[in-house]
Image (cartoon, rainbow, N blue to C red):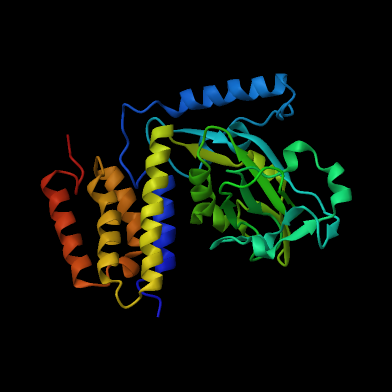
Protein backbone atom coordinates (compact mmCIF):
# COMPACT_ATOMS: atom_id res chain seq x y z
CA UNK A 1 0.00 0.00 0.00
CA UNK A 2 1.06 3.58 -0.54
CA UNK A 3 1.32 4.93 2.98
CA UNK A 4 -0.52 8.24 3.43
CA UNK A 5 -0.52 9.01 -0.27
CA UNK A 6 3.17 9.94 -0.57
CA UNK A 7 2.72 11.25 -4.10
CA UNK A 8 0.07 13.69 -2.83
CA UNK A 9 2.38 14.81 -0.03
CA UNK A 10 5.16 15.55 -2.54
CA UNK A 11 2.76 17.61 -4.64
CA UNK A 12 1.57 19.56 -1.60
CA UNK A 13 5.13 20.29 -0.45
CA UNK A 14 6.05 21.70 -3.89
CA UNK A 15 2.85 23.73 -4.20
CA UNK A 16 3.32 25.31 -0.76
CA UNK A 17 7.00 25.98 -1.48
CA UNK A 18 6.53 27.87 -4.74
CA UNK A 19 3.67 29.96 -3.34
CA UNK A 20 5.81 31.17 -0.42
CA UNK A 21 3.90 29.12 2.19
CA UNK A 22 6.53 26.58 3.26
CA UNK A 23 9.14 28.81 4.91
CA UNK A 24 8.74 32.23 6.56
CA UNK A 25 9.52 35.45 4.72
CA UNK A 26 12.19 37.74 6.15
CA UNK A 27 11.59 41.49 5.56
CA UNK A 28 15.37 42.01 5.75
CA UNK A 29 15.95 39.91 2.63
CA UNK A 30 16.97 41.80 -0.50
CA UNK A 31 13.77 41.95 -2.62
CA UNK A 32 13.48 40.01 -5.86
CA UNK A 33 13.25 43.29 -7.79
CA UNK A 34 16.92 44.00 -7.00
CA UNK A 35 17.88 40.48 -8.09
CA UNK A 36 16.04 40.91 -11.40
CA UNK A 37 17.79 44.24 -12.01
CA UNK A 38 21.15 42.51 -11.58
CA UNK A 39 20.15 39.73 -13.95
CA UNK A 40 19.06 42.25 -16.60
CA UNK A 41 22.38 44.11 -16.30
CA UNK A 42 24.33 40.84 -16.50
CA UNK A 43 22.42 39.78 -19.62
CA UNK A 44 23.12 43.12 -21.29
CA UNK A 45 26.82 42.65 -20.58
CA UNK A 46 26.78 39.12 -21.98
CA UNK A 47 25.09 40.38 -25.15
CA UNK A 48 27.75 43.09 -25.56
CA UNK A 49 30.46 40.47 -25.16
CA UNK A 50 28.70 38.31 -27.79
CA UNK A 51 28.44 35.48 -25.26
CA UNK A 52 24.64 35.24 -25.70
CA UNK A 53 22.18 36.46 -28.31
CA UNK A 54 20.01 39.50 -27.69
CA UNK A 55 16.82 38.19 -26.03
CA UNK A 56 13.50 38.45 -27.83
CA UNK A 57 11.08 41.19 -26.84
CA UNK A 58 8.30 39.47 -24.88
CA UNK A 59 4.86 40.73 -23.93
CA UNK A 60 4.42 42.32 -20.51
CA UNK A 61 3.06 40.04 -17.78
CA UNK A 62 -0.67 40.60 -17.22
CA UNK A 63 -1.35 40.58 -13.49
CA UNK A 64 -4.96 39.38 -13.84
CA UNK A 65 -3.79 36.25 -15.69
CA UNK A 66 -1.30 35.09 -13.05
CA UNK A 67 -2.16 31.81 -11.25
CA UNK A 68 -1.76 33.04 -7.65
CA UNK A 69 -0.74 35.96 -5.45
CA UNK A 70 2.89 36.06 -4.33
CA UNK A 71 4.26 37.33 -1.00
CA UNK A 72 5.77 40.78 -0.50
CA UNK A 73 9.33 40.94 -1.79
CA UNK A 74 8.67 38.43 -4.58
CA UNK A 75 8.20 39.37 -8.23
CA UNK A 76 6.90 37.66 -11.35
CA UNK A 77 9.22 37.30 -14.36
CA UNK A 78 9.26 35.32 -17.57
CA UNK A 79 11.69 32.40 -17.70
CA UNK A 80 13.66 34.11 -20.49
CA UNK A 81 14.28 37.05 -18.12
CA UNK A 82 16.18 34.92 -15.59
CA UNK A 83 18.19 32.65 -17.89
CA UNK A 84 21.13 33.02 -20.25
CA UNK A 85 20.15 30.13 -22.53
CA UNK A 86 16.96 28.30 -23.45
CA UNK A 87 17.18 25.93 -26.40
CA UNK A 88 16.35 22.42 -27.47
CA UNK A 89 19.21 20.13 -28.32
CA UNK A 90 19.85 18.97 -31.86
CA UNK A 91 19.56 15.59 -33.56
CA UNK A 92 22.91 13.78 -33.11
CA UNK A 93 24.94 11.53 -35.33
CA UNK A 94 25.39 8.52 -33.09
CA UNK A 95 28.50 6.40 -32.67
CA UNK A 96 29.41 3.57 -30.31
CA UNK A 97 32.70 5.08 -29.16
CA UNK A 98 32.37 8.89 -29.20
CA UNK A 99 33.89 11.04 -26.45
CA UNK A 100 30.67 13.04 -25.88
CA UNK A 101 27.40 11.56 -24.66
CA UNK A 102 23.88 12.56 -25.81
CA UNK A 103 21.24 13.16 -23.15
CA UNK A 104 17.84 11.88 -24.27
CA UNK A 105 14.45 11.92 -22.55
CA UNK A 106 15.21 8.48 -21.09
CA UNK A 107 18.02 10.10 -19.10
CA UNK A 108 15.66 12.65 -17.50
CA UNK A 109 13.58 10.81 -14.89
CA UNK A 110 11.72 12.03 -11.81
CA UNK A 111 14.03 9.75 -9.84
CA UNK A 112 17.04 11.69 -11.15
CA UNK A 113 19.59 11.73 -13.96
CA UNK A 114 20.27 8.38 -15.62
CA UNK A 115 23.39 8.69 -17.76
CA UNK A 116 23.38 4.93 -18.39
CA UNK A 117 20.52 5.50 -20.84
CA UNK A 118 22.65 7.85 -22.99
CA UNK A 119 24.45 7.14 -26.27
CA UNK A 120 27.55 8.71 -27.86
CA UNK A 121 28.00 11.38 -30.53
CA UNK A 122 30.28 10.61 -33.46
CA UNK A 123 33.48 12.59 -32.90
CA UNK A 124 33.57 13.78 -36.52
CA UNK A 125 30.16 15.50 -36.05
CA UNK A 126 31.12 17.57 -32.98
CA UNK A 127 31.93 20.56 -35.18
CA UNK A 128 28.23 21.39 -35.54
CA UNK A 129 27.90 21.92 -31.76
CA UNK A 130 28.50 25.53 -30.75
CA UNK A 131 30.10 26.12 -27.35
CA UNK A 132 26.80 26.91 -25.62
CA UNK A 133 25.29 23.57 -26.67
CA UNK A 134 27.59 21.61 -24.34
CA UNK A 135 25.77 21.07 -21.05
CA UNK A 136 26.99 22.83 -17.93
CA UNK A 137 26.73 22.10 -14.21
CA UNK A 138 23.45 23.55 -12.91
CA UNK A 139 21.60 23.35 -16.24
CA UNK A 140 17.96 22.31 -16.11
CA UNK A 141 17.01 19.54 -18.54
CA UNK A 142 13.31 19.55 -19.45
CA UNK A 143 11.67 16.76 -21.47
CA UNK A 144 9.70 18.36 -24.30
CA UNK A 145 8.03 15.62 -26.35
CA UNK A 146 5.42 12.91 -25.85
CA UNK A 147 2.51 12.23 -23.51
CA UNK A 148 3.75 10.80 -20.21
CA UNK A 149 7.28 12.03 -20.88
CA UNK A 150 6.91 15.76 -21.49
CA UNK A 151 7.34 17.89 -18.38
CA UNK A 152 9.89 15.79 -16.49
CA UNK A 153 12.73 18.01 -15.31
CA UNK A 154 16.06 17.61 -13.48
CA UNK A 155 18.92 19.88 -12.40
CA UNK A 156 22.35 18.72 -13.51
CA UNK A 157 24.89 18.21 -10.76
CA UNK A 158 28.57 19.00 -11.31
CA UNK A 159 29.73 17.50 -14.62
CA UNK A 160 33.03 17.60 -16.56
CA UNK A 161 33.26 20.33 -19.23
CA UNK A 162 32.36 19.48 -22.85
CA UNK A 163 31.20 15.93 -22.13
CA UNK A 164 27.41 16.10 -22.61
CA UNK A 165 24.94 17.51 -25.17
CA UNK A 166 21.15 17.20 -25.43
CA UNK A 167 19.13 15.70 -28.24
CA UNK A 168 16.22 17.47 -29.95
CA UNK A 169 13.60 16.21 -27.48
CA UNK A 170 15.19 17.86 -24.43
CA UNK A 171 15.12 21.60 -23.69
CA UNK A 172 18.14 23.06 -21.90
CA UNK A 173 17.47 25.92 -19.45
CA UNK A 174 20.49 27.80 -18.02
CA UNK A 175 19.49 29.98 -15.00
CA UNK A 176 21.06 33.31 -14.04
CA UNK A 177 21.05 34.22 -10.31
CA UNK A 178 17.79 32.34 -9.64
CA UNK A 179 18.48 28.92 -8.11
CA UNK A 180 17.93 25.99 -10.44
CA UNK A 181 16.54 24.05 -7.49
CA UNK A 182 13.74 26.59 -7.05
CA UNK A 183 12.90 26.63 -10.77
CA UNK A 184 12.85 22.85 -10.80
CA UNK A 185 10.45 22.83 -7.83
CA UNK A 186 8.13 25.32 -9.54
CA UNK A 187 8.03 23.36 -12.81
CA UNK A 188 7.60 20.04 -10.97
CA UNK A 189 4.70 21.38 -8.86
CA UNK A 190 1.12 20.41 -9.79
CA UNK A 191 0.28 23.92 -11.02
CA UNK A 192 2.68 23.58 -13.96
CA UNK A 193 2.52 19.80 -14.42
CA UNK A 194 -1.26 19.96 -14.94
CA UNK A 195 -0.61 22.23 -17.92
CA UNK A 196 1.04 19.40 -19.84
CA UNK A 197 -2.41 17.97 -20.49
CA UNK A 198 -3.52 19.06 -24.00
CA UNK A 199 -7.10 19.72 -22.83
CA UNK A 200 -5.99 22.13 -20.06
CA UNK A 201 -7.28 25.63 -20.90
CA UNK A 202 -3.78 27.01 -20.11
CA UNK A 203 -1.92 24.11 -21.74
CA UNK A 204 1.81 24.62 -22.30
CA UNK A 205 1.87 21.92 -24.96
CA UNK A 206 0.41 21.61 -28.44
CA UNK A 207 -0.23 18.73 -30.81
CA UNK A 208 -2.24 15.53 -30.60
CA UNK A 209 -2.91 13.64 -27.38
CA UNK A 210 -0.38 10.96 -28.34
CA UNK A 211 2.38 13.32 -29.49
CA UNK A 212 2.34 16.60 -27.57
CA UNK A 213 5.17 19.11 -27.90
CA UNK A 214 6.53 21.73 -25.51
CA UNK A 215 7.80 24.55 -27.71
CA UNK A 216 10.80 26.71 -26.89
CA UNK A 217 8.51 29.72 -27.08
CA UNK A 218 6.25 28.29 -24.35
CA UNK A 219 9.31 27.72 -22.16
CA UNK A 220 10.68 31.23 -22.71
CA UNK A 221 7.40 32.98 -21.91
CA UNK A 222 6.48 30.90 -18.84
CA UNK A 223 5.71 33.16 -15.86
CA UNK A 224 7.91 32.42 -12.83
CA UNK A 225 7.38 33.68 -9.25
CA UNK A 226 10.81 34.89 -8.13
CA UNK A 227 11.50 35.05 -4.36
CA UNK A 228 14.41 36.95 -2.78
CA UNK A 229 17.68 35.04 -3.21
CA UNK A 230 18.00 34.27 0.50
CA UNK A 231 14.46 32.87 0.59
CA UNK A 232 15.18 30.74 -2.47
CA UNK A 233 17.94 29.05 -0.48
CA UNK A 234 15.56 28.46 2.47
CA UNK A 235 12.88 27.04 0.17
CA UNK A 236 15.26 24.69 -1.66
CA UNK A 237 16.70 23.48 1.64
CA UNK A 238 13.26 22.84 3.17
CA UNK A 239 11.96 21.10 0.03
CA UNK A 240 15.04 18.87 0.05
CA UNK A 241 14.49 18.05 3.72
CA UNK A 242 10.81 17.16 3.30
CA UNK A 243 11.36 15.24 0.07
CA UNK A 244 13.99 13.25 1.94
CA UNK A 245 11.33 12.37 4.50
CA UNK A 246 9.02 11.28 1.67
CA UNK A 247 11.84 9.07 0.41
CA UNK A 248 12.08 7.52 3.84
CA UNK A 249 8.34 6.87 3.81
CA UNK A 250 8.66 5.04 0.52
CA UNK A 251 11.63 3.01 1.71
CA UNK A 252 10.24 2.16 5.14
CA UNK A 253 6.49 2.01 4.71
CA UNK A 254 5.68 0.20 7.92
CA UNK A 255 8.05 2.33 9.99
CA UNK A 256 6.74 5.57 8.52
CA UNK A 257 4.49 6.81 11.34
CA UNK A 258 7.06 9.15 12.90
CA UNK A 259 8.03 10.54 9.49
CA UNK A 260 4.37 11.21 8.71
CA UNK A 261 4.06 13.12 11.99
CA UNK A 262 6.91 15.43 11.02
CA UNK A 263 5.32 16.06 7.62
CA UNK A 264 1.96 16.83 9.24
CA UNK A 265 3.63 19.32 11.60
CA UNK A 266 5.37 21.11 8.74
CA UNK A 267 2.30 21.28 6.52
CA UNK A 268 -0.04 22.38 9.32
CA UNK A 269 2.51 25.12 9.89
CA UNK A 270 1.12 26.88 6.81
CA UNK A 271 -2.08 27.37 8.84
CA UNK A 272 -0.27 28.52 11.96
CA UNK A 273 1.78 31.03 9.97
CA UNK A 274 -1.29 32.67 8.39
CA UNK A 275 -1.25 36.39 9.14
CA UNK A 276 -5.00 36.96 8.92
CA UNK A 277 -8.31 35.22 8.24
CA UNK A 278 -8.03 35.68 4.48
CA UNK A 279 -4.62 34.00 4.30
CA UNK A 280 -5.82 31.26 6.68
CA UNK A 281 -8.83 30.60 4.47
CA UNK A 282 -6.61 30.26 1.42
CA UNK A 283 -4.22 27.86 3.20
CA UNK A 284 -7.09 25.82 4.61
CA UNK A 285 -8.69 25.42 1.17
CA UNK A 286 -5.43 24.04 -0.16
CA UNK A 287 -4.88 21.70 2.81
CA UNK A 288 -8.49 20.54 2.73
CA UNK A 289 -7.91 19.09 -0.75
CA UNK A 290 -5.39 16.72 0.87
CA UNK A 291 -7.35 16.10 4.09
CA UNK A 292 -7.74 12.36 3.51
CA UNK A 293 -3.98 12.12 2.88
CA UNK A 294 -2.86 14.01 5.98
CA UNK A 295 -5.46 13.17 8.64
CA UNK A 296 -4.93 9.42 8.77
CA UNK A 297 -3.71 9.02 12.38
CA UNK A 298 -4.81 10.04 15.88
CA UNK A 299 -1.66 12.14 16.12
CA UNK A 300 -2.49 14.13 13.00
CA UNK A 301 -6.04 14.83 14.21
CA UNK A 302 -4.79 15.98 17.62
CA UNK A 303 -2.26 18.29 15.95
CA UNK A 304 -5.06 19.74 13.82
CA UNK A 305 -7.16 20.37 16.95
CA UNK A 306 -4.22 22.14 18.60
CA UNK A 307 -3.64 24.26 15.49
CA UNK A 308 -7.31 25.31 15.31
CA UNK A 309 -7.37 26.29 19.00
CA UNK A 310 -4.18 28.34 18.62
CA UNK A 311 -5.61 30.14 15.61
CA UNK A 312 -8.86 30.82 17.48
CA UNK A 313 -7.26 32.49 20.51
CA UNK A 314 -4.95 34.54 18.27
CA UNK A 315 -7.87 36.03 16.39
CA UNK A 316 -7.11 34.37 13.11
CA UNK A 317 -9.87 31.77 12.87
CA UNK A 318 -12.72 34.15 12.07
CA UNK A 319 -12.71 37.58 10.40
CA UNK A 320 -12.76 40.74 12.54
CA UNK A 321 -15.69 43.12 12.17
CA UNK A 322 -14.66 46.78 12.51
Quarter of the image where one finds residue 47: top right
Is residue 13 in view?
Answer: yes
Q: Position of residue 24 (x, y in %)?
A: 30, 40
Answer left or right for 154 relative to 13: right
Q: Residue at x 59, y 54 (%)?
A: 153
Out of 56 and 103, give the one closest to the viewer.
Answer: 103
User: With 61 as the anchor, is 20 left or right in this view?
Assistant: left
Question: Can see residue 289?
Answer: no
Image height check: is 246 above or below 42? below
Name the outermost residue toward the bottom: 1
Q: Is residue 312 left or right of residue 135?
A: left
The quarter of the rendered structure image containing the C terminus is: top left
Q: Residue at x 25, y 64 (%)?
A: 261
Give the quarter of the figure containing the N terminus.
Answer: bottom left
Outermost residue on the right side: it is 124
Q: Nearer the viewer, residue 244 or 164?
A: 164
Where 218 falls versus 45 (above or below)? below
Question: Can you give x and y, in whole percent of width and height, for residue 149 in the image?
Answer: 65, 63
**Depicted 274 relative to depicted 59: above or below:** below
Q: Nearer the viewer, residue 306 or 50?
A: 50
Amino acid sequence: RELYGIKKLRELILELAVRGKLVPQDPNDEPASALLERVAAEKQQLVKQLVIKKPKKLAEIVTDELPFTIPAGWQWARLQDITSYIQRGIGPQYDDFGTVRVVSQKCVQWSGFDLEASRHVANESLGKYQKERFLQSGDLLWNSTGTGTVGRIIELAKIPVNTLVADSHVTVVRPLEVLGGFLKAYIAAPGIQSRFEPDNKNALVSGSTNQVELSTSAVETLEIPVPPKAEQHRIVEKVGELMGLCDQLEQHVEAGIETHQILVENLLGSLSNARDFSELSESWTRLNEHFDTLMTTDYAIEKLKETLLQLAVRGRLVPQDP
